[in-house]
Amino acid sequence: MLNLIFFIFVGLVLNYLTVFFYEKYKLNHSKYSSSHQTHIGQIPRTGGISLYILFFMLSIYQVLISKDFFLVSIALAFIPALIVSIREDLFLNVSPIKRLLAIVFSSSLLVVFSGINLNDIQTPLIDSLLNSKLGLTLFTIFFLTALTNSFNVIDGLNGLCSLTFIAINVSSLIISWYVQDLWALKISIILIFFPLSFLVFNFPYARFFLGDSGAYFLGFISTSILIKIASSNIFLPKWLFILALSYPFFEIIFSVIRKVILGRSPFYPDREHMHIIMYDHSKNLFGDTKRINPISTIFLIPIWGLPTYFVYCNLYGGIPIFNLISFYLFFYLFYYLFIRLHLIENKLK
């Protein structure tokens, strides 16, 4: 416990120094401007750097005390994506396709060298593709890449991505307690506290952001850990891990489908994501003030927090997993359409 407190303190120091040097010396990168922006002014997008340094320190500590190399494997495999995404955070000159290729490369490194995989998805079409080792590896790389990218899709409100990360790791904690996987239990507890030092400077009011590097890294960590738990406990239904990742999972799916239907590129952002719609809705309710950003994150608790409760219900309440996923899907779509229609109605008045 003392070790965990120490690493939280180190994280606070790293994040404070980032904010201090930026504000004191105006160490600015390219000015950020986007159609899906939900903040006012220029705020540094360098939270991913301090998070990576803290995670790397944690991973080395795990190697030293327990000869556990999985966390350090995550840190090392992520380096290609880290380099590309930090450049984007600082200079805003890296295309989405290049960032995606970097994530594919990082995902490939981790899957190939750590041996983690997703098999027995309990879906005939997918399982038929997983009969070969190559198919199994490619599917796991695809899954890890997609979910890593999905965290960048949902990153747009103060605290939203970090709180989603915490909720997913609470789900990991529930799963690992159920199967008595002591390694996963310990790692889940560490990761629940891991982003707290960043949240202090990001929620409710942001002094700096995760940036692409931080959002990708949180997605890479949480998805890798869940795949690792799935690989070690093959009797658990793989859909349980989809349930834990429901919010980023469905957000990336609907984002791609929506853009393809509308004839837009899936690689570029728009203002039709759940969190941006909620932000616009909150702006209509409360006016254009800095409070609406954290308020929007709070309003989205049913979206990012409900999957954790559903994981518990499946394991301890005996409710069938597909019923829970179907209910969440219905709730997600209802939430999305209700807010969207309410915004349209306000614009017509």
Image (spheres, helix red, strand yellow):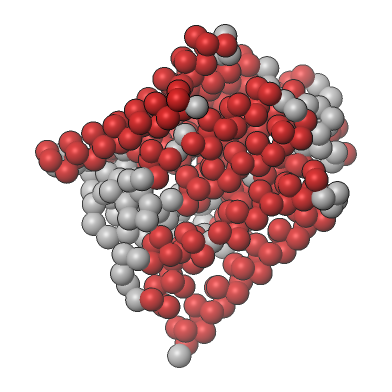
Q: Quadrant of residue 95?
A: top left
Q: Is residue 304 left or right of residue 140?
A: left
Residue occupying image coordinates x 57% and y 9%: 67
Question: Is any part of residue 290 visible from this angle?
Answer: yes
Question: Is any part of residue 101 visible from this angle?
Answer: no
Q: Nearer the viewer, residue 76 or 139?
A: 76
- The residue positioned farthest toward the left in the image shown: 25
Residue occupying image coordinates x 35% and y 31%: 9
- The residue positioned farthest toward the bottom in the image shown: 349
Q: Is residue 116 left or right of residue 39?
A: right
Q: Is residue 290 above or below residue 68?
A: below
Residue 173: x and y in percent read 65, 36
Residue 15: x and y in percent read 30, 36
Q: Is residue 250 left or right of residue 14?
A: right
Q: Nearer the viewer, residue 104 or 27?
A: 27
Q: Is residue 59 left or right of residue 13?
A: right
Q: Is residue 214 above or below residue 205?
A: above
Residue occupying image coordinates x 32% and y 55%: 205
Q: Quadrant of residue 87?
A: top left
Q: Is residue 280 above or below residue 142?
A: below
Q: Quadrant of the C terminus?
A: bottom left
Residue 207: x and y in percent read 28, 48
Total numbered circles: 0
Q: Nearer the viewer, residue 149 or 315?
A: 315
Residue occupying image coordinates x 61% and y 68%: 335
Residue 324: x and y in percent read 78, 55
